[in-house]
Every structure is written in C-alpha cells, then in structure tokens.
Image: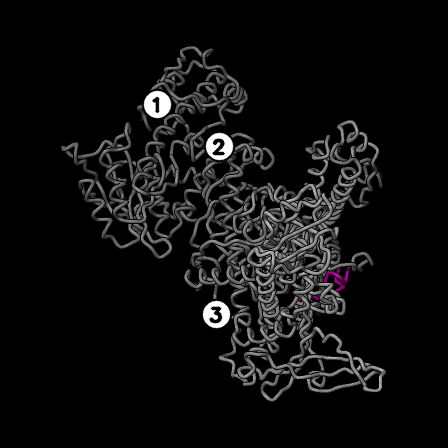
Amino acid sequence: MQPPASATVAQSASLKAKLGHYHNLKTLADKLNEIALRLGPDASTPAVQAALKTTPMDVHPDSAYHSEVGGSTSVDSFINRQGGLLSPYSHLSLTGLSDAMAVRSQAHPLGNLGGALSWPVPLSADEQQRLRTRTLDYTDPLGQKQPLKHTTGGILEFLRHRTPLAAEALTSPGATLNALVSSPEAQSLGHALQEQMQGIATDSSSLDYLLAAVILQLDPESITAPQRNNVAGFDLADDSLRGKSAAQIVDALRQHLVAQGKTSPELAGAAAQLLLAGRAPVFLVKDIPDSVTFGSPAWVNLAIAATMVDAHIPGRVANMSFAAVMLEAEHASGADVNMTNTAQRNALIDWGTANGLLEKKAEHLYASDELNNLVTRFSERQSVMLAASEAFDKDIPSRKAMALAELKQRFPDKEALFEEPLIRVTHMPGGDIRRRNQVPGVHSLLDVAMMDVGPDAVYGSRDSRIPVGALNANPEFGVATAFESQFKQVIEEKKNAVGTYIKHLISQLPADDRKNFEYGNVSFYQNHAHKLGLGLFSDKTELPKGEELLVRIERGGVTTAYEIDFNAGAIRSIPQWQAQPGSSRKANIVSETKVFTPSAGQTTLDTEQTPPGDSPSDTFASPRVQLIADAFVEHINLDDPAIKQQARGLTTDDNIRNRSDMIENFLLDLVPLRSAINHFRNGNIAEGLIDLSLDAFGIVTAGVGAAGKVVKIAGTTVSAATKVARSAKVIGMATFGAFNPLSGAGDLAVGGARLAGGGLKFLGAKGAQGVNALRGASGRYDLLKAASNEHGVVATGTVKIGEHSIDGAAVLKNGQWYAFDAEKMRAYGGPLQGFAPTTVSAKGQINQSFTDWLYKKLAGEIQSPEGPPTVLGQYAPKEFENELKRAQRPEKVSDFNAGYANGDPHKVPGFSSDSTILELQMLVSRGWLGAEDVGTLVKQIERKKVRLIQEGFTLFQRDIHAVGGTLTPMPQEFYLSQVNLASPGECAGIANTLALSMQSGQETTYLGNMFKAAADPRDPVATQFIRTLRSFHEAVKHVDTFHMGKQPRQIPYHQIATELTDASPPRSLRIATKDHALLAGVMVRDDKPVWFYFDPNFGMAQFDSAEAMKNGLERTLNRGTSPFQHRAYGTNPGTPEYQVSYFESGDMQFYRDSAQVHRIASVPL
C-alpha cells in the first residue's frame, strides 16, 4: 500500500498543541491551589481577584496559547481566555476550579490510546484484519526503508527510523509514545490507512487508525481470539504473577514483547503503555504501594476504581497516583451502574481464579451461583482483614488512663490533686475495726483508682482538699477489673490480627513458595542471644530474641529457608544454613539459633503433603498455613507478662513491692506491638490536603479530620458497610451486589475482549447514553441540533452489530451514514451498513422526526389541532402537482423558497386556518397564485400532514406497545412530503419492496434507504431510488396488480394470525384493503422467530411471540387505529375481511425492472 504523496500531517501539530494545553491546565490547577492556601478559607472576593491578577503562570511552548501571550501570563488572563470558565471569587471556588482543572489535565488527548478499537462502536473483527493487512503492506513513501512487514521491531521501530527521539521523549514510555505518533511518518501512515479503510476524515481519524494498527500488530491474536486478560500473548492474570506488584508485571510484559520480537528493548515500555492503556489501565497507576499486589483484595479495590475512573475519562488513570484513584473510587463507581457491575465482576473473577476459588474459564460460562458464592468469600476475606487492621489500630488499655478518666468523672474539680500522695489506705474486713490492716505508703487519688483496693477499704487524709467522705462512701472504682477484661480482649484481637497478616503475606508469595508453605515439611527456628558477664562464675544476661521467625521447608527433596519479618511486612528467602541449629560468638555476645516447636500443629507440619492438582489453591484459607500463622503468633509471645505489666502501670504500692524492676529492664519495642504497629503502616500517602494512610493489607484510610473532606469529594455519603468497617474512614473499598451470568452472545463479534464493559451489552449501553445525551433531559434535542449545525445532517437511530441492533447516532456525508460519537461530537469510522434513523436534525432543525413527529424544519413550534384529523393519504388533485412543479421552476424557485421560509398564510387569498389538506391543495390547483404564495401554502400543507402523522402514529404506537410489541417508525407521509408532496401515496410499492428486502434480511437497509432519499432527494443516487420506487408502485398500485399475478384470497382478519402462527419463516403475507396495502409475516432473527406487521402509514411492528402478534392484529385489523379504520372487505363489521396473498421472490418476474427494485431493497445508498 503506497500512501498519497499529499498526505496531511496537520494532526501532528494538533496533538502537540493539545498536550501543551493539558500541561497548562495542570499549571493552572497548581496555581489556584497555591492561591487558596495563601489566602486561607476566609479570603474575600477582592483579595481573590487581586491574587488572580498578580499571580503569574508559565505557558507551555507547544500550546496554541503560547503563540498569543508568550511564555508567561497571569492566572486571571489565562482563565478569561479559555472560554466557559468562571473566574473564582472565594476560597471554595478557588479549590473547586483547581480540582476541576487537575482532573482535565490528567486526561490524554487520545483518550485511552485505543484509537479505532476504542470507538463507541469499534472496528469489527473483519475490519481489524483488513487494517492489519493494509498496515503490513505499507511502504515508506520516500523509498528509504523496506516495507513495514519486513521491519524488525514492528510499527514503532518503523516510525523511529524517520523520527530520531529527543532526550525528553525518552524520559517515560508515555513521552516516547507521544513523540512517535506525533511524527510526520506516523501521520502519513495513519492518513493512508484512513483512506484505505474508507474512514471519514476528522481531526483525529489518522491517529485513530494508526493507534489501532500498532495495537493489532503487537496483538494480532486479539482479532480472532480476544481474551480480557491476554495482551499480545501475555496473560496478565497468570498464576505466576500472583503477589507481584504492578511494576513487576509491566516489566514482565516488556520482556515478553521483546522476546517475541514484537518491538525493540528501547520501545518496549512505549508498547506496553499502549497495550495496557486501553485494556488494563490499572497497571499504569503511579505510586502503587508494594503491599497492593495482584491477587490481593487490595488489588480488587484498585482495579475496580481504576476501571471506573478511566471509563469516565479514558486515559486519565495513567496520569493519576494510587491515592488519587482511590479517592475517586466511590464517586466514579456511582456514575455508571452497569460499568461498575462489570468492573466488579471482572476484578472478582481475577481474584477468585488467582486464589484458587474459581476455575479459570471463559467468563460467560460462570454461573450466577459461582459468582455470588465468590462475592461472599471475598466479602468475608475483606472483613477479616478489616478487623485485623482495626485491631492493630487499637491501643492496648492503660490502667492509668482508665483510672484518670474515672477520676475526672467523679472529681472533676480535683484534677490538680490526682497524683499528689496524700492518702492512707486501710483494710477493714467485714467493717471490724479490730481487724484493720493498713496498706503501706502514702497514696494518690490516681493510686487509689488504679489499685481498686476493694469494698472494705477506708481512706484517710490530713489534707482537707481530699474528698475523703466521698471516697469512703463509694470506695470502689472498678478500674482493675475493667482493665483485665479489656486487656485480654485487645491482646486476643491482636493475636488474630497478626495471624491474619501472616496468612496474607504467605498468600502473596510466588506460586512455588506458596506450595512450599502449604505442602512441605515445615520446621521453625528462633534467633536467641545472651551477654556473657565478666565475673568468675561466667554469669550471663539473656537478650531479647530476634523478632523474625525462621522457617525451614523440605518439599520434593528440595530444602528452602525463609525469614518471616512481621515489622518489615515481608517473607524473604534466606540461605539454608541460617535456619538450622547453630551458635556464634562476637566479643561477649553469644548468638544462637534454636529449634522452636509450637504448642500445637507441629506434628501435622512435619509431614509433607501432595498438592491436589496444578490449579491455584486458596493459600489464605489453608489449614497448614493457619498452623504456621499460629506458630508465628506464639513466637512473638504477646502473652508475655511484661506487656501486661507495662499496660498496668505502676502505683505507689507496686514501687514499694519492687514490681518496677521487671518493667525497667524490659524493652517494650522489642515486642511486636508498638514497633510492629508503627511499621505496619506504610506511611503517609497524602493526596492534596487530605492525609491518607495505607495498612499492610492495602486498606486506605483517611484521618478522622479528613473523613468529612473525603465524603465531600466523593459527592455522596459513605455506605453502611464502610461506616461499620472503619467509622467512615475507609477509602475506595468496593461493595458488591448479586451477579448474573453473562450471555456471551455477540461479544466476540464486536471485539468484546477489548471493551471494559464486556461486549454487546456494553456497546448497547454506551449507544443509549449517546442517544440520551443528544436528546437531552428536556427532550428538545438541543445537542443533536447543535451537532447538525456543524455536521449537516445528524440522526439518532439503530446500528447493526452483526445480527443485533443497538441504539446509536450517525452523520450523513456524501450519501453515506457514518457513526457519530455524541461525547466527542465527531464522526468516526467507515460507512455504516444498516443504520436506521429515528430522529434527524438538519442544519439545526429537527425536520425529520421519526420518534415524536415534531417537524421543526418548519418555522415555529407545531400547535396541536383543535380536533383529531380525519383524513390520511387522501386523493391529491393532478392540478396541484402541476402547479407545484411550475412554482419550483428555476426562474421562480427563489420566490417559492421565500414564501416557504417566511410567508404569512393569512395574506394568501382564500386561506383559512380551518382549511383541510385537500382544500389547500385545491386552492393551489386553481393556478392564479404566485410562486411565493404557493410556497407559503406548501408549508401549511406539510404542517397539517405532520399533525396527521403525529396523531395517527401515537395511536398506532399505543396499540403495538399495549400487546408487548416494538415499533420501527417509517410513515410514507414523511417520505412523500420530502420527495413528492403531491403524491397520494405509494403504499403498494413500499409494502412489496419491504417484502422483497425481508427475504434476505435487509429490511433495515431498505427503510434506511427511504430516509436517505428523503434527507436529500436531489442527490443523484436518491433521485434514482425515488424514481425506482415510484415506478414500481405505479405497476402494483391497483387491486389486481398489488398481488403481482397471484389470485388473492379473501379471509377474515383472525385467519391471518392463525396462518402466520404456523408459517415457516421467512414468510410475508400481502394484505389489501379497498384502498391501502399492508404486509405481515414471520422472519428469523437471532435464531428465533419474530412476527411483524407493516403499515406504510406508520411503520413496522415486531412481536416476539405468535400470541402477541395475534393480539396486535386484533387491534390493527379489527378495531383499527381509531380514527383511521381500514376500509376492509366483508359484510360483517365485527369480522372484517382482507384480500391476501403470500409474497415470493419469484413474484418479481412480474415486473420488468426487477433488478432495480432488488437494488433499492438490499443495497445501501
């Protein structure tokens, strides 16, 4: 494929300018934030305005704004030149605009870099294959390099041949990719591909095709066998990646791409970025903590959050930090329920398969029971980790703190005396003064509360400030008992938490290491040490044992050793010799490694076991892993009496009894409570003004003071589950509902594996969103009209995807429909096949409304008629047609158009607002009106016809919907009002042509052709269509010719339904009244029979059951769509009869120009 010599490269500058603009928005966001911090929350409007004017900001040299102002401008000037931005006037508006600009700046001009594969309706598999073939055949237009297919390293390396990369372009994969696709060589290739694919030319079309081409070259397997987690033959969900960080997995992908010869080592990063941006953006999130690894519950939450954020603004996630993504999670998940469900489903499946809870298979094969059981398991796992995280957060009870709290409540005015030793305590058992027993020492109120001497205590003091009377009246404080209970509970919770974390660490190890822990012969060792004394008797002092637990495992004849380091949050491989008995001495310090035998489970762990199979197992829930976790809990000895004594604190009585010695000699930090908890947090991951913390499970929390800010940012209240979990401080934790199984139907036909939403259902939802956006909340189609002002003719309707139809929008260019992206307001892709418009706007006017029949091509709003119309498709005088042609002659057409556009009908002699359509046609037929008056009356005739269509269609639609049918509107009055206003109707030709089109399943094409012809009847192709249909109608319009040579049968209406119930599809039955032609039948769609009924005055009704069809015909053929009842045959009004005959393709032999009819029935205009 040789590109045109004049291929445009304008998009190169466009991309650079957009990147520069986004950089400016980031600078603006930073400056606004600086101003907000500097002025504070109480900033006045004058102060804010002054700061905006005096604060400078740099302007990126690649941005268009740089050519206007140079390298610097004021913040105020930049805001005012953007258009649509309101200048801040307060602290709140400063931070609000800063946040909004930060969000915009994080996007990428090319979205998620998927190009044509990320269009609302992406390239089909056939188009993808064709694009890849065209790409490989591409030849350097200057002849300086061999054809692309022979280039080692693929397209990216081919582009680099002509694009030497500057130093700044090599700073990151993203920068490298931007430089390559902005190059003239890239633009030349993209433009050539667009033309070869017959794509509509837009400001992004070349890059869209280029990006898709690069992806398909890297990942050709996805064309015929797309899989969600498979990228260029690399399985992102492979079991070997469990427990790996995002950076490690991306690096593995880079190595794979190089090893497979798909790109060069220098460009592997850019290739990986391109592939992941559209398929798995979670891997591109910046600053992901080490504790958030693939296969962990924390990864599930991150994957869901990243998918949702990127679905809302494609390409944004790659420029966001982990903290920013998690902060955005709750708000993003509420934006699109269907997308959220899909993201949750995919993330849970990945978690389930990685952890052995779910068999890996095609995703539509998972049953709802499997998925909902998985939801339960995940929720349980997450709850366990939340409980562990909360347990680590809990302070160990302090007897002193509890006593002080009790004292403050009982003696709030005596706080200065709480620790003054002024009280003597005496026991008087049974109240007998002869048996009194004095507690040694002088005590403080704090001592008294902490000791809780008992009910027989008697207090005395020589200091009158001491409330002796109150003390003796109520001598018990209850602190000691409460402390014992709380301490025991907290220690147990912390034991469980430590065990949970150890299981989590083991579950995140590589596959072979996990198997060692689960199935190997396990033994434990501890590091001890003592200090030798200098005396004659060689006394020694025991030193605290090592915090790490050493593990020696034998499996399959291989010995491995590990060190479980709780404080570092790691399990590390160590040399075997370190995990075996031994000793060493350095100076007077003797170090020993001793066997540690836990009190339970060692017998089980001494026996090597055989894995049940090759599939992953749920390591976290393994009974043997639980025993290892229990052993570690026992190893750190949280039951050490010294811990409790530290929490008890010292009273005067304790000091007298010399209990302080064991405390003074005990180094608490060597027990994994304080030190472990301090290390357990991975530090501050502040994002903006909000302080976030991350525990070792990957659970993100906001500080108490920041919780309100997080809720405000999320724009919604936190869920009940989150409140329970962490008092409204947990950030980004997903909550799940029930899942239903995927149908799988049609997904592969649309490249479903490329879609975040998973195929046809996702496309349908996106298409509906686009149509709803064009319609608007008010139903006025303001956005559709705005789009048509720029693009000419834009319509909403249905698009064919394989055998399915989805809602969509399209723009009409050169007689072809092209898909229209309502979000980006631009057309894309190649010509659509089978687009059926419903609501159409031309140059800002809704002039062809197939949905609600507003006819706003005419000036002003349509007023409802005083009474229901009573005429439909009545006779039109021949003279009317002649006068219409005369008024539209070249020398008079300007006057005709002026009357049509601006004429006042009340100034036309003989006009009355009560005139019927026929009366107005007769008025024109008299021949004495000028061309301007004719144009004025034609407009009124069109208006009255639209009113007629409105009334009739609404009633017809009501009848069809009442029986569960669907309706595709196509009233001939609309078509004829555009192509031949004087026509009395072409129902016979329209019905027979529809029957012909349905023989080959092309009815949507045929109905779409009718609209195209009506949209631009002067187009030569449309003119031919109009002429062919009109001629065919003339040949079949009579009662004896409508049935095309067949002898019709006259049968009652209910027999029609009976015959079609038993008919073998496809089958079409012509139905004739005395003055109208109809069609009914049965066809096959999606391997199911679908019954239909077509009235050319309204459109085609479809029913998914014979019963619904029967009920529909009861309403339309018997009662009729009041007040437009058919003029049926028969003598019994309660049982109307019709003349019928079955249509066969051989009937077309009756007509001499059948080839042309075949063409308009099946070939898109």
Q: Nearer the viewer, mark 2 or mark 1?
A: 2
Q: Residue furthest bottom?
A: 557
- Give the x, y percent position of residue 249: 65, 67
Q: Looking at the image, tell me whether mark 3 or mark 2 is earlier in sequence order.
A: 3
Range covered by the magenta-colored residues: 142-162
**Does 109 lie within the magenta span?**
no
Residue 588 visible within the image? yes
Residue placed at 48% from the left, 18% from the top?
931
Amino acid carrying label 3: it is Glu
Q: Which residue is mark 2?
A: 779
On the image, which quarter does residue 2 sit in? bottom right
Mark 3 nearby-residue class (10 Å; few <14, some 14–19, many ≥20):
some
Q: Which residue is mark 3?
A: 359
Q: Nearer the viewer, mark 3 or mark 2?
A: 3
- Give the x, y percent position of residue 234: 61, 69
In the picture, the disc for residue 877 is: 1
Q: CA distance from mark 2 to mark 1?
A: 38 Å
Q: Looking at the image, tell me whether mark 1 or mark 3 is earlier in sequence order.
A: 3
